Image: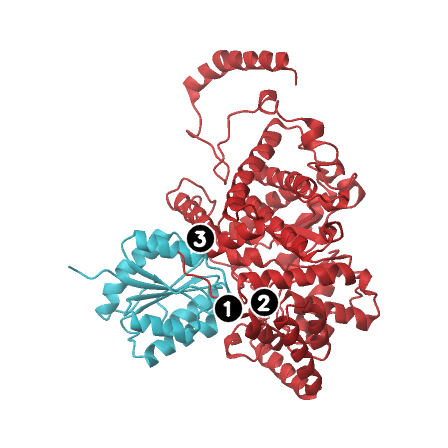
Amino acid sequence: MENRKIEEMKKEREKWENSCLAPYMDRFGERDEMFETLSGIKVNRIYDPTDTAHIDYIRDINYPGQYPYTRGVYPTMYRGRLWTMRQFSGFGTAEDTNARWKLLLKEGQTGLSTAFDFPTLMGIDSDSPLADGEVGKVGVAVDTLKDFEILFDGIPLDRVSTSFTINPPAAVILAMYVAIGDMQGVPREQLRGTIQNDMLKEFHAQNTLVLPPEPSVKIITDIFEWGVENVPKFNLISISGYHIREAGSTAVQELAFTIADGMAYVEAAIERGIDIDRLAPQLSFFFNSHNNFFEEIAKFRAARRMWARIMREEYGAKDPRSWWLKFHTQTAGCSLTAQQPLNNIVRTTIQAMAAVLGGTQSLHTNSFDEAWALPSEEAVRVALRTQQIIAFESGIPDTIDPLAGSYYVEWLTDKMEKLAWNYIEQIRKMGEGSMLRGVLKGIEDGFFVKEISRAAAEYQRDVEEGRRTIVGVNRYTIEEKLNIPILKVDEEVQRKQIERLRRIKAERDDEAVKEALNWLRSAAENDENVMPAILQAVKVYATEGEIMGVLKEVYGTYRKPVII
Amino acid sequence: MERKIRVLVAKVGLDGHDRGAKVVARFLRDAGFEVIYTGLHRTPEEVAMAAVQEDVDVVGISLHSGAHMTLVPKVMRYIEEYGGDLSEMVILVGGIVPEDDIQKLKEMGVDGVFIPGTPIERIIDFIRKRVPEKKRGEKAKA
């Protein structure tokens, strides 16, 4: 905007403040002394063109499909194709989960997303004493390729894309998926899906920890190197802020730490000599969508703009596709309340709308009963219907990035970007110029953990002291008796799963397993890429625990320092 | 001087959700209790061993894994095995626990179960009341 116009506007504003606002304030006042977002960003009474005068439309916002992609990575966004409705699910045995998946596909879900149980997530077999009581509880149990054969029975891999929330054993799960594709006769270059494969955020927040940080990054880089050659349509990582947020971070921390982690992975790949323009389209992101509606929308828009600039300007990516930040969103599990659970449907709706207004590529909406247990079928249906109502009834997806140009949203997008950059520069300094070293240093020093814990404690203090209202929890509470149906996992699952594992172990070719595991050990010891050996091991029915066991022997294990 | 109430905050099993455990630990410490946090991924044996060795008044077990019906009784069994006295030690469970299971855990001798959204103030009050009560040999009312 021209300076002259801005000056005029400022005068008009002053006039409004003095003649209109002030007398009204004198009489009625406002609800609070101060208003803030969940990240603690101070929210002004009103925003006008003077707040966004420093933002240049073409330079900073531009049209969708055009750098820096603030309005979306595709030129038509949801007018062309809606986001993928991808509900995360899995429980019990592979048979149970296969049945739930088929139901979801029948109900109109357009992609699959796998929840594994804790032993599988940690690379522990179902027959380990450490797995007792946890088999099939929070997701499906997978020990060998046999489980994957059942899981994908009747699901054609050339037609459905599957996302896997898996981290330390990501290489094993990717290998299993590729092996199933081979069995179904689907060419590897056609396989579509995502492995989460983001260990850095595990150290910051999610705590699925097996190997130490450096070898963890080494294996992730192996997956990149193998993946660009073999499965070029597969997302090799989902760089995740979701769990950072769930652990209690602010939206700004979520944004900053996720982008910082992304930069660390890119630097690791460049060090390995991987062509960044080949890898970048196979990177994806995963964010949380919490309750503060505009802050979330601003976060998504800021993330896209930051990543485009980073990939182009810092890392010299040439292909515009390398500048795109494509992301999955899940509504905030930590915002769900056990009290008055139906209220969660409303929270999830607001969060899902923020994700859509933020331009997400895929979305998981939480079910209203998840503060109590894994979701029941009815609750999952409502969650999926929430997305369908937004998609088909609300009109929200019918024009692209409808909130662009809102003085508040543009100001907040810019503000979040600036605050995130402050963190990134701090991390870069910790790494003496390297983001990879900076993030590793931050893990070693407990920087991320302390930052997130502090924010979590502050949030809780605000709730305890009533400064932050949570409807049904610290305000508008009622005496209630829970009458929602709760999904219970059959206690027989563990026994059945151990039985299957025993049978596989008895039937497989032990020599071939030994040979494959020896190959893996030597690859790890000689700093070679571990993917080919893991694929071979999976195909001869080595267990996930055996494969991870070899990696633990070579690289050692990690125990997180205790920081409250 | 009267001894401060000693609380062990424990993460047992494979789940890594430690937000609740850490926030509660911090608030209990601020409320004047002596708090020991086990860190992540402890086995029931390790938790029980820590409870007995540290001679705590309260063990607060945090789980978000759905494995509470297996792991909580195991912790309690090992506490007794290692010479701890469950008739005096207050056992609390926090996390995602369906209502049916809350009843069952209480029948097993768990003193209190706190689900997400519980004000920490309520946990603090519960501990202050229940610890001396249990030492006097009174039965839980809640």
Residue situated in front as seen by the camera: A258 or A109: A258
Q: What is the crowding at mark 3: few (fewer than 14 residues within 10 Å), some, or many (at least 20)?
A: many
According to the image, label 3 marks what residue? B117
Provide the chain ID for the residue under circle 3: B
**As drawn, A13 above or below A401:** above
The label number, if any, that marks residue B14 in the structure image: 1
The label number, if any, that marks residue A121 in the structure image: 2
Contact between labelled residues 2 and 1, with CB atoms less than 8 Å apart: yes
Q: How many marks?
A: 3
Chain B colour is cyan
| Quadrant location, the N terminus of chain A | top right
Q: Does residue A425 appear to the left or right of A283 in the view shown?
A: left
Quick one: which chain is red? A
Contact between labelled residues 3 and 1, with CB atoms less than 8 Å apart: no
Disc 1 marks which amino acid?
A: Leu
Q: Nearer the viewer, mark 1 or mark 3?
A: 1
What whole-number distance in Å separates the C-alpha atoms at marks 3 and 2? 27 Å
- Are labels 1 and 2 assigned to the same chain? no
Q: What is the crowding at mark 2: few (fewer than 14 residues within 10 Å), some, or many (at least 20)?
A: many
**As drawn, A246 above or below A312:** below
* Residue A97 in which image quadrant: bottom right
What whole-number distance in Å separates the C-alpha atoms at marks 1 and 3? 23 Å
